[in-house]
Amino acid sequence: MRILLVEDEVKTADYLRKGLSESGYLVEVAHSGLDGQHLAQEHAFDLIILDVQLPGLDGWQLLQIIRRTQQTPVLFLTARDAVEDRVKGLELGADDYLVKPFSYAELLARVRTLLRRGPPREVEHFLLADLHLDLLRRQVTRQGQRLSLTNKEFALLHLLISREGEVLSRAQIASQVWQMNFDSDTNVVDVAIRRLRAKVDDPFSLKLIHTVRGMGYTLAVQP
Amino acid sequence: MKRWAPSALSVRLALMFALVSMLLLGAIGFYLYHALHKEIAWRDDQALLGRVQRMQAILTDSRSIEALRERPQLYENMLGNRDNLLWVVDAAGQVLIEINPPGLPRPTLPATATAQLADDPNGAPLRLAWQNMERGEQRLTLIAGKVLSEREQMLAAYRLKLGAALGCGMVLAFALGWLVSQRGLRPVRELAQRTAAIDSQHLHLRLDEYHSTAELQALSQALNHMLARLEGGFGQLSRFCEDLAHEMRTPLSNLMGHTQQTLQRERTVAVYEDLLVSNQEEYERLARMIDSMLFLARTEQAALNVQPVDLHALGEQLCEYFEGMAEERGVVLRNEADGELLADADLLRRALANLLANALRYGAPGQPITLSTRREGERLAVSVHNLGPVIGVEHLPHLFERFYRCDPSRAQPGDSGGLGLAIVRSIMQAHGGEVRVRSDEGGTAFVLVFAA
């Protein structure tokens, strides 16, 4: 998967390039709008990550130029999160946006979602090692043993297993499980994970829920 | 098209003064002129009638008309001057006596037994009185007349004087009006000068109150109130900037100090990892602070997305969210909220979440936290109540200020950086409601009051 990153901030561009490369993507970096335009027209990319504040040709203009010829998914980054800015980006044809400062886990999740082609599969059964989640019957078993989870614990595990291997930030989890779209400055998510672990991981030797320090949580066989 | 009007208020006032005096003086002059005109006409008429009567008496006494014609001085004296005319005409239309210095044609008049008055039917400036009389077999018509030109001249002179007086009056009224309004508007100029001296550096200055002028007093008071509000807002803003800079220093100094200390010598990977994780926590704290600040800055002028909110369902959602934390502290969350409210659901959820988080953070372990609703007449009050340490009375008025902490040493890494309650208050202000707090032995309650 090839990603074009247009970002004039050298440090930002640098760590994003490193991070995305580590996640297995081929990353091309452009430090100005014109370079970005050139690269986007010369090569085919699967995703373009675009900073809005760029010297010369700004992100909005570049987005318009790109949209004239191609439908490559575009994720834009902005430090201004006024509603008008977001709406403008989406109206110009961007697919998603992130407001700086964003969590790297969040960026990775958005990139994965945008690169996932086609409609999301309607999965009813999830299987990870000896953990099995049946969405229709709302049942969770490990090593064949039925685990009794509350509604929210089930929703949390469902989120983790449907994004298996991805690191989910606390804000993402709070938003998806409880529809809390703001940072409530509490350790609600940590407590919920702790309680889920007590039921899903603690009785078994193979641990599946992992804490990624400084980022969030992930469900995987190997951290 | 813009109507022309002088820009200076004093000139405008003076013009209005002049206009008003013109109308007034004009009306008075018109009345006086007409009164005089009528009076003179009446006197002339009376004189004419008197003359006709006297002529009648003379004619009745005299032996013959001829005798009278012989002695013209008899009536000539009586007639006096060139303005007066007299005809005595018999039934055949023959003029017996004619005194007519201006040589005007004799008017033909209808017969009348009693004395009549009329203007000259030929159109000459002449006022006439006439009467028919019988003298033996003779039927005579006596006509006395007065030429009006002298009267007209006098009245014309009078009109001219009136007009001149009116003009002078207007000019005088304009000049006086201008002087008076210049003088009267002096406080306005002073007010403008004083106001011009006030800028952001001198917001503490106030305008003198003009107790003598009710209008200016109201204006200067209103301006002073505005200044007080501006000064308050300005002060709050600069205090806020100061607080903000101060609040950012703590995490930044942690970041710098910890990083420098770690870099002083080679460390194990675990130490570097610890440093990075610790840094990450500080970064998140800064990011949260910036988010909250932006939120505060925007809520105060944001358009609300108002919709009916089911309070019980919202309470359930929040209780589910805080369930885990509550259970760990042995706290039971009671949702006694009920009813429906018109509000911005996201903002209301955020306000209640902040209050519940505070209640969990500061409430006594093992005691219940209650979310309830109550009608207060027209208004709806949503309250979060917990048992726990009483908040000192001295803190209560400041609780909703940004960055206020009851105990400055108790800043926790996970807390909202002292912005949680400020956010609650600004959400309530955006809704046109208010937030109240009560804290005593019976527990601490934060109440959101919504106007119906």
Image: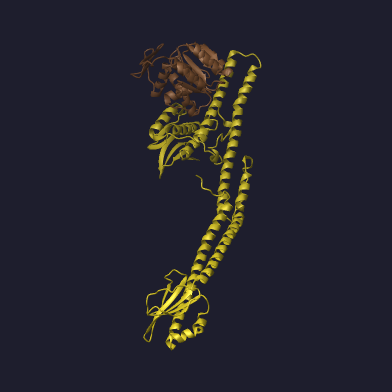
Q: Position of residue B302 (x, y in %)?
A: 48, 34
In this image, B286 relative to B66: left or right? right
* Relative depth, front residue between B117 and B12: B117
Residue situated furthest left in the rendering: A137
* Figure check: A134 above or below B286: above
Chain shown in brown: A
Q: Chain B's shade in the image?
A: yellow
Residue situated furthest right in the rendering: B264
Which residue is depicted at the point 42% across and 24% down? A177
Counting every numbered tag in the picture gives 0
* Any part of residue A73 in sight: no
* Any part of residue B18 in sight: yes
Q: Position of residue B337 (x, y in %)?
A: 40, 36
* Relative depth, front residue between B396 and B50: B50
Which residue is depicted at the point 53% across and 12% down? A28
Q: Position of residue B374 (x, y in %)?
A: 41, 40
**Colour option used:** by chain
* Relative depth, front residue between B401 and B30: B30
Which residue is depicted at the point 43% across and 27% down? B321
Quadrant hosting residue B380: top left
Q: Position of residue B414 (x, y in %)?
A: 53, 27
* Figure check: B317 above or below B108: above
